[in-house]
Image (cartoon, rainbow, N blue to C red):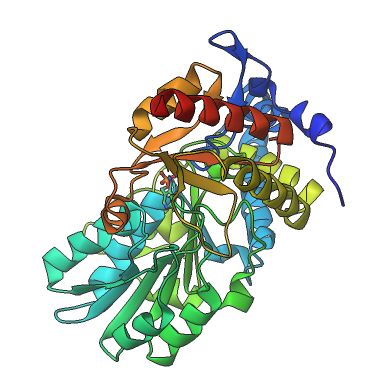
C-alpha cells in the first residue's frame, strides 16, 4: 500500500508551523516522534471525562479508566505478538525497563564472575545499568565489536559466548547509526549457552514488525514517545516464567497481595512490577498511537521511510566533505553524518536556522563515537510524515554549509 503522506501530515498539528521564519522540517524522530491529533484528543478526553485512579475504585469513572488502561495493555500485547497481556509491564521508558531487569533479574540471577554481553553500539541506557550491576556484584561486561560499516561482528560475538554468559542485552536498531542487528541469530546463539536475551527496541518498534514469540527474546524494552505516543511511558515485555522468577522492582501500592508488618506477599504479574499510581493518562493515549501505526501498517511505513533514506543517501553522497557514519546494509531510517572539518553542533545550528531540526552530538553512545574516532555526528532520522521534498531541502542545506566551509 502506498501511503497518502499529505493526509498523514494533516493528522500532526505540530508539523504545521514555521521555525526561524521557515516551514518546520522535523528530522529528529529517533529522539522522539511527533504525536497525531488522536493521541492529543485521548489525553484531553481522559482528563476531561474519565480521570480516576485505577484498579481499586468502586465507581463508574474508576471502572472506565481501568478498562481503557488495560485495553492499551492488550493493544501492546497484539502489537508485539506476546502470548498474554500479563507479560506487558508499563514503565517510564526504555531506560526504566532496562534498569528494572538489571535490578531484579540481574541482582537475583547474575553473580560474581558471570558475564553479560552487550555491543559497541549500545545507548548509554543499555550500558550503565549493567556497569552498576557489575560494580555491585563482580559481574564481567563483554563487548561485541563492530565493523567500519557499523555492523556487529557475529563471529566475535560467538567467541564471547560461554556457559558464564547469563545475559545478552543488545540494541535491535541503533539510534546513532540506524543499523538493524541480526537479533534472531543473536537470540538463538545466546540461548544455546543458556543465556537470556534482552532487546532494546527503542528504535525498532516503530519501524519493524516484531513478534516476541517468533524472536523468542526473553525481554523487550521500548518507549511510547518514539512510537507517536506520549513521553514518560515505556514497556517492558518479559516471558511469564522469567517475570515470575524475578523479585519486585519498586515496593508500594498495587504491587502487593497482602501486607502485614511481619510479611508482605506480592501481586501477580504484571502488577507486581507496577508499584504506585501508574501513568494512567499516557497509557490510555498510547492506544491511539498504536491504532495510528496499525491503520497504515509497519510494512508500508517502513517502505516509505526506506525510500526517504535511499533518497537522502542518493542526494547527499556527492556533496563534497559529506561523510556518512554507519553504512550497514540493513538500516532503519537514520542518516548519521559529518561534514569534513566542521563540528556537528555547528552544522545542526546552521540547519536549524533553515527550519530543519536534526540532532547533533554523541546520541548517548559515547563508546560508539570513540570506536569511530569522532566526537559526534549530525543525525537526520525520518518518520512516516516526512517527504522527499523535505529531504531535498536538507540536501540543499547541507550542500550550502559544506560549500561555505570549503571556500
Ligand atoms: N535505547 C535506544 C536505542 C534509544 O534510542 C533510546 C532513546 N534515545 C533509549 C534506549 C532510551 O529511551 P528513553 O530515553 O525513552 O528511556
Eyeballing the image, is 185 above or below 18?
Answer: below
Eyeballing the image, is 270 above or below 213?
Answer: above
- Does residue 58 show up? no
- Residue 87 % position (x, y): 54, 66
- Residue 37 % position (x, y): 71, 27
Question: In the image, is 230 to the left or to the right of 186?
Answer: right
**Figure quadrant of residue 273:** bottom left
The one of 390 and 250 positioned closer to us in this rendering: 390
The outermost residue toward the front is 407
- Does residue 5 show up? yes
Question: In the image, is 74 to the left or to the right of 8?
Answer: left
- Residue 380 % position (x, y): 53, 39
**Figure quadrant of residue 46:** top right
Eyeballing the image, is 359 above or below 219?
Answer: above
Give the residue at x 69% y 21%: 13
Give the residue at x 61% y 63%: 85
Give the residue at x 53% y 46%: 335
Question: In the image, is 133 to the left or to the right of 329?
Answer: left
Give the residue at x 62% y 51%: 206
- Image quadrant occupied by the C terminus: top left
- Residue 91 % position (x, y): 44, 49
The one of 36 and 18 positioned closer to us in this rendering: 18
The outermost residue toward the right is 1
Amino acid at each position: 500500500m502506498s501511503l497518502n503522506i499529505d493526509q498523514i501530515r494533516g493528522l500532526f498539528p505540530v508539523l504545521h508551523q514555521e521555525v526561524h521564519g521557515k516551514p518546520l522540517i522535523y528530522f529528529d524522530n529517533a529522539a522522539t516522534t511527533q504525536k497525531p491529533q488522536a493521541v492529543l484528543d485521548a489525553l484531553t478526553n481522559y482528563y476531561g471525562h474519565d480521570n480516576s485512579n485505577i484498579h481499586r475504585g468502586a465507581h463508574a469513572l474508576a471502572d472506565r479508566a481501568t478498562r481503557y488502561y488495560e485495553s492499551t495493555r492488550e493493544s501492546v500485547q497484539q502489537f508485539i505478538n506476546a502470548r498474554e497481556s500479563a507479560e506487558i509491564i508499563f514503565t517510564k521508558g526504555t531506560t526504566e525497563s532496562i534498569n528494572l531487569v538489571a535490578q531484579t533479574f540481574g541482582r537475583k540471577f547474575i553473580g560474581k564472575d558471570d558475564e553479560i554481553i552487550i555491543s559497541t553500539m549500545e545507548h548509554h541506557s543499555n550500558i550503565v545499568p549493567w556497569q552498576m550491576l557489575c560494580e555491585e556484584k563482580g559481574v564481567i561486561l563483554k563487548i561485541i565489536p563492530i565493523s567500519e560499516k557499523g555492523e556487529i561482528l557475529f563471529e566475535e560475538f560467538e567467541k564471547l559466548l560461554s556457559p558464564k554468559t547469563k545475559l545478552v542485552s543488545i540494541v535491535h536498531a541503533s539510534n546513532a547509526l540506524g543499523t538493524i542487528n541480526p537479533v534472531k541469530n543473536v537470540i538463538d546463539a545466546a540461548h544455546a549457552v543458556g543465556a537470556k536475551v534482552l532487546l532494546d527496541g527503542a528504535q525498532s518498534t516503530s519501524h519493524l514488525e516484531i513478534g516476541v514469540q517468533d524472536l523468542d527474546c526473553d525481554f523487550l524494552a521500548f518507549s511510547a514517545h518514539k512510537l507517536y505516543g506520549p513521553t514518560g511511558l515505556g514497556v517492558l515485555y518479559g516471558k511469564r516464567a522469567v517475570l515470575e522468577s524475578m523479585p519486585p522492582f519498586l515496593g508500594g501500592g498495587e504491587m502487593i497481595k497482602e501486607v502485614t508488618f511481619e510479611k508482605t506477599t506480592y501481586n501477580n504479574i504484571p502488577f507486581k512490577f507496577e508499584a504506585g499510581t501508574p501513568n494512567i493518562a499516557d497509557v490510555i493515549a498510547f492506544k491511539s498511537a498504536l491504532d495510528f501505526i496499525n491503520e497504515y501498517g509497519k510494512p508500508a511505513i517502513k517502505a516509505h521511510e526506506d525510500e526517504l533514506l535511499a533518497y537522502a543517501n542518493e542526494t547527499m553522497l556527492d556533496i563534497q566533505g559529506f561523510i556518512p557514519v554507519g553504512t550497514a546494509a540493513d538500516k532503519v531510517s537514520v542518516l548519521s553524518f559529518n561534514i569534513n572539518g566542521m563540528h556537528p553542533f555547528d552544522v545542526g545550528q546552521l540547519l536549524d536556522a533553515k527550519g530543519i531540526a536534526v540532532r547533533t552530538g554523541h546520541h548517548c553512545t559515547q563508546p560508539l563515537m570513540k570506536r569511530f574516532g569522532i566526537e559526534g555526528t549530525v543525525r537526520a532520522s525520518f518518520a512516516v510524515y516526512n517527504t522527499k521534498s523535505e529531504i531535498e531541502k536538507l540536501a540543499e542545506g547541507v550542500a550550502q554549509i559544506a560549500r561555505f566551509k570549503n571556500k
